[in-house]
Image (cartoon, helix red, strand yellow):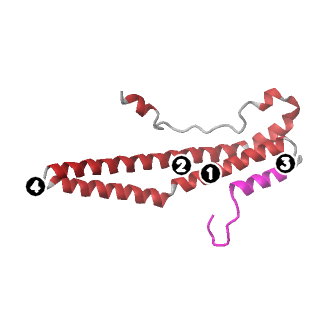
Amino acid sequence: MVLPLFTRLPLRRPVPGRVAPIAIGDECRLLGGRIEALDRALVAAFADQELIAVQEQTRHRRFRLVTLVLAALTSVLGAVQATAGDVAWPGLAIGVVGLAAAGVSRYAQRTAPLAKYLTSRARAEQLRALYFRYLGGLDGDDERQLEVRIAQVVDPMPHGDGER
């Protein structure tokens, strides 16, 4: 009964998605040169951002799950303490589990997996849009300009305060 619940947990290594949902090169031979240029310049950057996004999303979900489990355990131990009146161990256990929950939450806040996920996801989607803009001819045929635009998406300029 409980095992199907755990099969949905992301416990295996994440696999990044593809830029295009189909293999465009096989379908449209007229776009061969553009697709080869995109494969050289853009697909690796997209795969990197996609992988980072999937990993950080998984980390964020795991932190939330662990925090939720620790909070539920704290509540259960509180109920045990309320029923066991003059026994001291439930209070100590509540303190330890509460500290563990606070530590996990603080670590999750400091490492900011949600912010990293959102940043990487936005960059991956910008690269996907750039892929289709170049493929459709909206950005011209200049491969050097394509590489410059990819670099601007992947490594944007700092915003005056020295942070990215």
Give the CA distance from mark 3 to mark 4. Answer: 76 Å
Give the CA distance from mark 4 to mark 2. Answer: 45 Å
At which x and y percent is residue 86?
A: 10, 55
Label 1 environment density (alpha carbons within 10 Å; few <14, some 14–19, many ≥20): many
Query: Tag 1: residue type?
Result: Ser
Proximity of marks 1 and 2: CB atoms separated by less than 8 Å: yes
Earlier residue among tags 4 and 2? 2
Query: Tag 3: residue type?
Result: Glu
Left or right of 70 in this view: 155: right
Label 4 environment density (alpha carbons within 10 Å; few <14, some 14–19, many ≥20): few
Earlier residue among tags 1 and 2? 2
Query: Tag 4: residue type?
Result: Asp
- Of residues 158 and 121, the one nearer the viewer is 121
Check residue 131 in the rendering and tell me which mark sits there, or answer none. none
Check residue 143 in the rendering and tell me which mark sits there, or answer none. 3
Give the CA distance from mark 1 to mark 2. Answer: 9 Å
In the rendered view, would you say 162 is above or below 80?
Answer: below
Earlier residue among tags 1 and 3? 1
In what element is the residue under mark 1?
helix
- Of residues 27 and 44, the one nearer the viewer is 27
Left or right of 58 in this view: 146: right
Proximity of marks 1 and 3: CB atoms separated by less than 8 Å: no
Q: Which residue is mark 4?
A: 86
Q: Which residues are magenta?
A: 143-164
Give the CA distance from mark 1 to mark 4. Answer: 52 Å
At which x and y percent is residue 18?
A: 67, 37
